[in-house]
Amino acid sequence: MCGICGIARFNDRPVVPNAVARACRALRNRGPDHAGVWESADRCVALGATRLAVLHPGASAHQPMCVHGGRYTLVYNGEVYNFRELRRELLTIGHEFFTQGDTEVVAMACAAWGAAALSKFNGMFALAFYDEQSQRGFLARDRFGIKPLLYAEADGEVRFASELAALKQLGPLDSAVDQTALIEHLQFGYIAHPRTIFQAARRLAPGHYVAFDAKRLEAPQSYYQLPVSSPSDGHDYPDARGAVRRTLADAVVRRRVSDVPIGAYLSGGLDSSIIVSHLAEASGQPVPTFCVGYEDANAYDESPYARLVAKRFGTDHHELMLTEADVVASLPSILDALGEPVGDSSIIPTTLISRMARKQVTVVLSGDGGDELFGGYWRYLGHQSLDAYRRLPGFFRSSVVEPVLSQWSVSKSSRFGNRARQFRKLLRASSSDALARHIAWSRILSPEAEVIFADRAMAAACDERFLRHARSITADTGGDDLSRVLRLDLLHQLPADMLQKVDLGSMSQSLEARVPFLDHHVIELATSLPSRFKIHRGQRKRILVDAYRGFLPDEVLDRPKQGFEVPMGELLRGPLREMFCDVVSRGAVQSFEALSYEGVQEVFDSHCARRGEHADVLFALLSLCWWNRSQ
């Protein structure tokens, strides 16, 4: 695992190598073991990399890596798990190898097949490859966006980096904020590709590459499309259960390849427990597992379930039991390290558990992706629940249920308060269009909180843009409404939110996180299954639960879904209140033309008085203003 960066000029002027060296220093957290910079003979291209040594840790595998007498150069962030199979294929066509790791295989594959090599890789990666003889190269990102790649075209050159902070070191970057990205950040809690917070910088889409030559940067091109699957009732359910188990087991085994210690996050939820079960099954010694718990917030504490799984599989289990004071004390350093606004407060426990894990291992396996593939989130049940509610008499709904619901104190920290919050969110959706409903339920910004915008029409316009995008990426894909919304979350929200959070949180601690659920074999199997295998009679993740019944503890299989969260709502009402008011000040808010300070205060006051639960958007505002003051 590494951080990568570089510059390619289109006007025959030499690059400034010190700029690439500066960017490498900004990426040191991603690669503390080595840093290197390579320049082309004409000095029009410079590539940089920092290395976290995981496979073949010796100096011969350092980057930038040159092959075929220096004609081809690669900088590469990630792991390709099928590199041994590719190595054998390349040997048969005459390529010679000098290392045992995957970086040289990736370089040789790109030299042999060009961008066509990308579809052969099973793994996670962001890379830049350059052919000095033809003066052509390309940037690329893995199929599902596990690893990040940002780029900007300015001053007759293209610059790229793994993180926004490093991109800024490569040369002047127009600091104008992308207003659409700003609104998206506050509306949904993330900024999706191709946007970043800056107008001048873009994020390469998953499954895409962008080529360049000595004169220009070409338009991004797709090298992978999730197959169009029309889930069929022809599947045999018992056979499908077995296939899910086998495919996930294979994906975990592939991700065990490592020359450094490896462990797993273990939240106590179904997905991480599945990963740990297969990792333990394939390992000859106790697997290190890592869990976050809360000493003073029982509603958020999953550690008892994690202990059950750890005991079942004999893992070397480590717990980090946090207090409110721990979260508050850690927040400034976490926000400082992000380099861009992040609207998901689970970046906090992700970073803290990664810090603990890094003391024991260099690689961890994570359960991300299981919810989007198998129907784990409550909003996937929302369509059935809303239809059932609307079958109640209209008078009863409007005169009894909804008035009572509007007066109920809401909070994620209490069972009934959280149910009231979820039900209020459910009633936001008035459309009969499944995608429009899904977008309404995906928002972190409630309708009453739209007052944070100087013009409330901005929120509606953001919804419309998202709906058009959702329709475009789910059009002609077959399947029912559930299949469409799962596909949307897999291709849109997952890389922008969850994977971004895990990458930033883990790599800030020089820890590599691998994601078995996002093996393309697992994804292609899951997307081929009918919806009734995933959600059935109110049960989410039906096929996962049934596939692992008798293998995982029943307490884990039958427990309610619980997010990997911090008690941000209560923290903002208490220990973080002063910090929020200091950071999200009038001056800070008014520096963004799209925002209303009075509206922000109204939402904050409503949250503190428990008239609404606005923790998510308030954290997004805090992250935004914290980032902005460092610009």
Image (cartoon, rainbow, N blue to C red):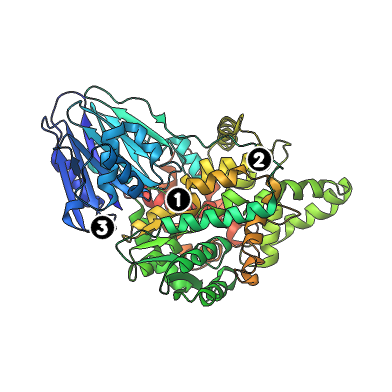
Q: Residue 53 carries which label?
A: 3
Res. 231 mark: 2
Q: Which residue is drawn at 75% across and 48% down?
A: 384
Can residue 261 be spotted in the picture? yes
Within 10 Å of the Cα at label 1, are there few (<14), some (14-19), or many (20+) other Cα atoms? many
The amino acid marked with disc number 2 is Pro
Secondary structure, mark 2, is loop
Element marked by disc 3: loop
Q: Which amino acid does label 1 sit on?
A: Leu
Q: Which residue in the structure is indicated by mark 1? A: 499
Of residue 577 and residue 558, the one placed in the foreground of this image is 558
Disc with the residue nearer the chain's start (1 vs 2): 2
Check disc 1 and report its element: helix, strand or loop: helix
Q: Locate residue 324, reporting x and y percent.
A: 48, 71
Q: Earlier in the sequence, mark 1 or mark 3?
A: 3
For marks 1 and 2, give the CA distance. 26 Å
Where is residue 239 drawn, in percent x and y? 65, 52
Task: Say which of 586 and 33 sits in front.
Answer: 33
Residue 315 image label: none
- Displayed quadrant of residue 473: top right
Residue drawn at x 54%, y 43% as measured from the top left? 524
